[in-house]
Amino acid sequence: MECRVLSIQSHVVRGYVGNKSATFPLPFLKKNMLSFYFLSLCYAHWKGQVLTAEELNVLYEGIKLNKVTHYDYILTGYSRDTSFLEMVVDIIQELKKVNPSLVYVCDPVMGDHGAMYVPENLLPVYKDKVVPLADILTPNQFEAELLTGRKINTEEDAIEVMDLLHKMGPETVVLTSTDLPSKNGDQFLVALGSQKTKKPDGTNTNQKICMDIPKVDAVFVGTGDLFAAMLLAWTHHHPKDLKAACEKTVSVMHHVIKRTITYANEVAGPGNRPSPAQLELRMVQSKADIENPTIVVQAKVLQKSS
């Protein structure tokens, strides 16, 4: 079940953010990676080059000259330039012509908790050009609200928003985090997912799920990037079973984060808050959990209909 993945994301010289959150774990799950790096980041300050749309096109021309244009998956994440994002769209459209079965996994990174941290002019590009191309979409609640123009206050609202996102293009939508109250208490956050699949007889089915995920009192970077990469991997292994794919994805996240916070607290010492450096994801140490996660978060099926 080997496949080829093209990942177009940011890159860090230390830690696991953007492409580093994909290029490390995906090969363990039999995914051959080719990555474009376009931004170098480091903690509260960033230095390095920002790849322009023209430079991205030059790299893509190199791919075409070397005749390596057949990919099974494309993964994209953070971008803050409209021309760059539009070039990504052009590349995806071309690669989907080469392989009509190519699956595009899009993490529409725009903001969180009611605030955008990318320029506002990226929103129409995502709505009109990027999301219609996506097969799998992984927004948080705020990003889903931006894309649909609808607020999420209840589980029913979330279901409606996922259905609206389906109508925009993606067959699989996962709301990676929401502000909805968990039935397990305030130490859990709620994530939801929806998947439309076609049966051999041509009829359509729709599976919707909900997950209560344990919270951790710390700020991590790269977790959204890791989530998207793991969802890519586990939907490849479970293409018509969103429940199984999400349980494995979220369980990987749980193991990595638990190992990270345990290490960070030990290094920081009693009574001290861990630093960003101490909270770098313990990815190497979590290799076994990435390859074969023990399921610690069960997804509840909300509805499965034809």
Image (spheres, rainbow, N blue to C red):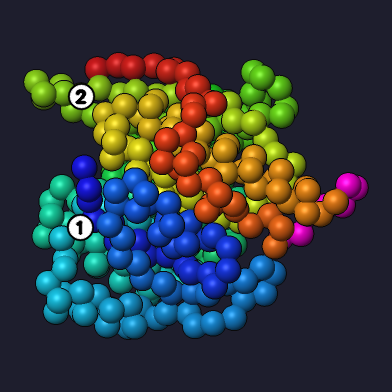
Residue that label 1 marks? 71
- Identified at 43% across, 74% down, the residue is 38
Mark number for residue 24?
A: none
Q: Quadrant of residue 74?
A: bottom left
Q: Is residue 231 left or right of residue 112?
A: left
**Depth order, front residue of 84/253:** 253
Mark 1 residue crowding within 10 angstroms, few (<14) / some (14–19) / many (20+): many
Q: Type of residue at label 2?
A: Asn
Residue 106 is situated, as x and y percent measured from the top left of the image, at 38, 52
> Chief secondary structure of the magenta span?
loop
Earlier-in-chain disc, 2 versus 1: 1
Element on which disc 2 rests: strand
**Depth order, front residue of 70/179:** 70
Magenta residues? 270-276
Q: Quadrant of residue 62?
A: bottom left
> Is 182 situated above or below 151?
above
- Identified at 41% across, 72% down, the residue is 37
- Identified at 48% across, 47% down, the residue is 287
Q: Quadrant of the N terminus?
A: top left
- Identified at 50% across, 22% down, the residue is 298
Residue that label 2 marks? 204
User: Is 275 in the magenta?
Assistant: yes
Q: Is residue 105 left or right of residue 40?
A: left
> Is 113 situated above or below 124?
above
Q: Type of residue at label 1?
A: Tyr
Can residue 141 be seen here?
A: no
User: Is 2 in the magenta?
Assistant: no
